[in-house]
Image (spheres, rainbow, N blue to C red):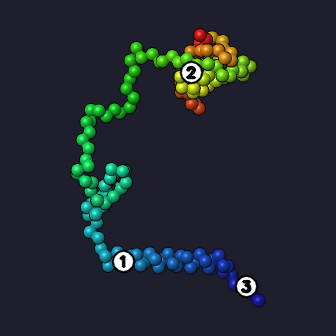
Amino acid sequence: MVKSQQSFNKKEKETNRAKKQKDKQQKKEERKRNPTDGSLANMTAYVDEYGMITDTPPDPAKKLKVNAGSIEIGVPKRDKDDAPALRVGKVEFFNDTKGFGFIKEQGTQEKYFVHANGLIDEISENDTVTFELERGAKGMNAVRVRRM
């Protein structure tokens, strides 16, 4: 006996392809029966006060007046007088052999990473220090660390 060359998978693909063609033909006939004018008015979309796209225009009563001069684009330039604020903290952990540690700021209790390259004075655990912050690859880092 000779087996059929068509497997179940081939039959399934063929029926799916035929169904897609049939659906496409039905959609084409439906477009012919219900033509749209294709004008820009039918394609207009609006954004409501919540940021959602709708087909109804916004309510003029909810319109807000915005002063264009108050909008800032980018970051304003800092004056030379604006020195970064010195922060005070306590060294929670510092490993001399590996050259890194963590400083806990006194006011906010935030912990910041400190590397030996960012030290001005030598520090050890439980020292009170002043430092500045810089953005690093993984967050804020304490730099220019001085012992008090």
Q: Can residue 99 be seen in this view?
A: no
Q: Residue at x 57, y 30 (%)?
A: 139
Residue at the limit of the structure toward the bottom, as seen here: 1
Q: Residue 30 carries which label?
A: 1
Q: Residue at x 27, y 56 (%)?
A: 57
Mark 2 — residue?
Answer: 106
Quadrant, the C terminus: top right
Could you tell me residue 25's position as x and y percent? 42, 78
Secondary structure state at the residue bearing disc 2: loop
Residue at the limit of the structure toward the right, as seen here: 1
What is the CA distance from the residue labelled 3 to the residue labelled 1?
42 Å
The numbered mark, 1 or 2, whose residue comes first in the sequence reads: 1
Q: Which residue is drawn at 31% across and 34% down?
A: 71
Residue type beneath disc 2: Gln
Residue type beneath disc 3: Lys
Could you tell me residue 144's position as x and y percent? 57, 16
The numbered mark, 3 or 1, whose residue comes first in the sequence reads: 3
